């Protein structure tokens, strides 16, 4: 009887582990078009979004002083790392108007975090590929 109890305990721990792994994975992007990013598990689309292991939310540029210039701020990518991202994808917008300052890239390099900077369509494709196997975070700008 003891063996059965141990087996049941192991099954519940395995189930808990699998649920945690699943809930902490990076969400897939279902669709991107001008001004619209549809993310797995979200009822409403985003215009600009932060995605990371375990979730996503609207990317409000005003919170960190992000603008086309100077570009993506260190505090924007720090949030991705705080959520467990081990790889980062940064989208520059559909027409590549969003800049990425050297300081932001250096910040990631110092932490040995691989970073990919791409136009939005390409960034989405790479992010989705990486999200299948890695804890990836991304910042996505869906307009210019």
Image: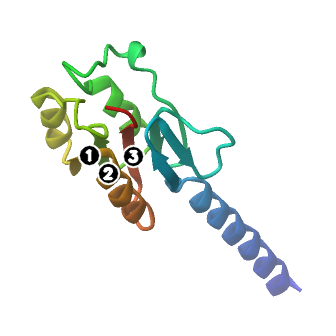
Label 3 sits on residue: 137
Compare residues 14 and 44 and report the one nearer the observer.
44
Compare residues 81 and 94 and report the one nearer the observer.
94
Q: Are marks 2 and 3 in contact (CB under 8 Å)?
A: no
Residue 30, position as x, y percentages in the image: 54, 56
Using the image, tell me which numbered label, if any, was put on residue 123: 2
Q: At numbered mark 2, what does the secondary structure look like: helix, strand or loop?
A: helix
Q: Earlier in the sequence, mark 3 or mark 1?
A: 1
Q: Residues within 10 Å of mark 3 (few under 14, many from 20)?
A: many
Q: Compared to 77, does 123 lie above or below? A: below
Judge from the rendering whether residue 55 lies leftward or rightward of residue 95; answer left or right. Answer: right
Residue 93, position as x, y percentages in the image: 30, 37
- The CA distance from mark 3 to mark 1 is 16 Å
Q: At numbered mark 1, what does the secondary structure look like: helix, strand or loop?
A: loop
- The CA distance from mark 2 to mark 3 is 11 Å
> Which is in the foreground here, disc 2 or disc 3?
2
Q: Are marks 1 and 2 in contact (CB under 8 Å)?
A: yes
């Amino acid at each position: 009887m003891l063996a059965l109890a141990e087996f049941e305990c192991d099954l519940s721990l395995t189930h808990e582990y699998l649920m945690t792994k699943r809930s902490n994975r990076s969400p897939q992007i279902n669709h991107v078009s001008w001004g619209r990013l549809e993310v797995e598990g979200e009822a409403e689309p985003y215009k600009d979004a932060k995605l990371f292991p375990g979730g996503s939310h609207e990317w409000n540029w005003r919170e960190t002083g992000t603008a086309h210039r100077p570009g993506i701020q260190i505090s924007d990518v720090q949030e991705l790392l705080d959520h467990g991202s081990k790889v980062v994808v940064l989208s520059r917008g559909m027409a590549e108007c969003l800049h990425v300052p050297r300081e932001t890239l250096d910040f990631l390099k110092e932490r040995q975090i691989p970073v990919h900077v791409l136009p939005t369509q390409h960034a989405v494709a790479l992010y989705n590929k990486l999200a299948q196997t890695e804890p990836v975070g991304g910042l996505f700008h869906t307009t210019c």
